[in-house]
Each structure stands twice: as structure tokens, then as C-alpha cells.
Amino acid sequence: MAGHSHSANIAHRKGAVDAKRGKLFSKLCRKIFVAARNGGGDPDMNLPLRYAIEKARSYSCPKDNIERSIKKATGELGAENYEEVTYEGYGPGGVAVLCEALTDNRNRTAGDLRKAFEVCGGNLGATGCVSYLFQFKGLLLVDAKTIAEDRLMELVLEAGGDDLQEIDGWYEVTCDPKVLEAVRKALEEQKVAIESAETTYIAATNVDLDVETAKRMIRLREILDENEDVQNVYANDNIPEEALSA
């Protein structure tokens, strides 16, 4: 599984939902809360909120949880306060790692993440230490069985998208985040089924890991995923199949 394979990452996350459902719902609802707080509670007028709701629904997050998060953000229910923080560091083997977090206590989150990095042979770094290695992009996933690559490429370019590649049975369509919604609408108008549409960080280059180092990197990802404050983890690791099998 290459570090840049977002289709594989999504499949992995969905496969782990049952074991971590409560914690996952908490993360998804925090994202909804912040999006609604920043841009209002109407998903038709607030694209980040719309994307957050759709992502929550894709993991079967209960409707009541979603609505309660929006009401808290708009002041209809008790107040909560989360801030968005991006942490950067180096994982085992010099892998660049970005962690997007929503936290009500920066000191707690930073301490937890620092310990996670150190336990796995890495270190939490200063702001800007690895972010330059990533590009912020819009990303859409399309099942490769549903449309020919040439036809999809034609539609993507006409809509203002950048590129696409096929990985593990999925087309990963990339674009400037500003035109993500335009590309999405163009594909939907042509009856192209979209698995997901979101903004993400994509590494410019990847670091190849040996099996033992990859195991430590996988463990770091697992620890970070288990942290309720951490929303997304991006890394430029290239993990060999032997490590995944082990």
C-alpha cells in the first residue's frame, strides 16, 4: 500500500469502523461542529459542513448525533469549544507526518502526540517542518469498474480538474480545492458515481520503508487514529505488502 493511496486508506478506515465506532463518531461530529461554527448550520450554504455531514453519513453516523453537533455549534444547545490545530513531525525512517486535530486542550493533545511519535521511533516537530512536502488538493474517488479511464479523464479536464490515476481498483481524481465542488457537480451530472469528495494533503514524494520500520510506522498510525483529538493523518510512507501481511 503506497502512502499516497487514499482509496486504500479509506478502505482501511471503513474496515475498522465496527471496532471503534463510538470514538469515530465523536471525531466526525467534532468536524461537523467546527464546520457549522465557522460557516453556519445550513449545509447548502456551507460546503465544509456539507462534506463533513456526508463523510459522517458514509460511516453510518446517527442522524441525531449529526443534528446535535450542528445545534451545539449554532448555540441552540450547550456550548463546546474546539480549535483546529495541525501538528507536524517525523515518523520512523524519516517519514513526514501531518496530523490535523480538533482539540479543546492544546497542551494535552501535543503531549499525547509527542509521546506517540517517540514510542514509535519518531519525533514531533515544529510548525512547518514537513508541511512543505505536501500539496493541499481536492480529491474524488470513483470506482474504476463504473467508467472508462479515458472518458473520466475527459470529464475531469473539462470541469477544471488536474489529473487522475488508477490505484487498487479506484480512480483518484485530483484538483485545486477551489474547484472541487465544480468537478463533483460535473461528474454527477454525467451520472458518475462518486465514492467520496474531500480536501486532503498529498505528498510530493514518498519514503520507501523496510518491513521492520514499516511496522513501527503502522503502529504510529494506529496510535494516532485512536486519539479522539486527531481527525486526519497524512504521511509520505510507502509501506511494503509484507509489513501489512504481518
Image (tube, helix red, strand yellow):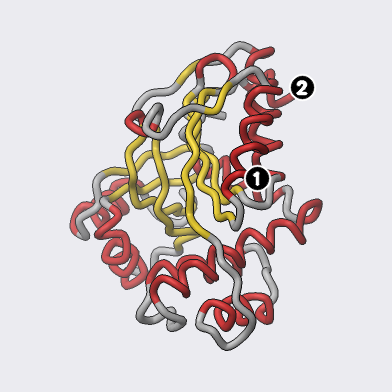
Q: Secondary structure at mark 1?
A: helix
Residue closest to the eye, 195 or 180: 180
Identify the image quadrant of the N terminus.
Answer: top right
Who's the residue at 68% across and 81% down the image?
64
Residue closest to the eye, 126 or 43: 126
Q: Residue 220 in the image: x percent, y percent?
A: 66, 30
Residue 66 visible, this orientation: yes
Q: Residue 50 in the image: x percent, y percent?
A: 45, 72
Identify the image quadrant of the C terminus.
Answer: top right
Q: Residue 199 in the image: x percent, y percent?
A: 40, 53
Mark 1 surroundings: few (<14), some (14-19) or many (≥20) residues within 10 A? few
Q: Name which quarter of the figure residue 191 lies in.
A: bottom left
Q: Residue 222 in the image: x percent, y percent?
A: 70, 36
Task: Please tell me whether residue 160 is drawn above or below residue 135 in the rendered image.
Answer: below
| Side (left or right) of 72 relative to 180 | right
| Earlier residue among tags 1 and 2 | 1
Q: Secondary structure at mark 2?
A: loop
State yes or no: discs 1 and 2 in contact (Cβ < 8 Å).
no
Task: Please tell me whether residue 11 is drawn above or below residue 208 in the rendered image.
Answer: below
> Which residue position holds label 1?
108
Q: Name which quarter of the figure residue 183 lies in.
A: bottom left
Task: Please tell me whether residue 148 is drawn above or below residue 26 in the rendered image.
Answer: above
Q: Residue furthest front?
A: 107
Q: State how many labels appear.
A: 2
Who's the residue at 70% across and 36% down the image?
223
| Side (left or right) of 152 relative to 106 | left
Q: Name which quarter of the figure residue 116 lies in.
A: top right
Task: Please tell me whether residue 97 is drawn above or below residue 45 in the rendered image.
Answer: above
Q: CA distance from mark 1 to mark 2?
A: 32 Å
Three-letter residue code for mark 1: Arg
> Which residue position holds label 2?
246
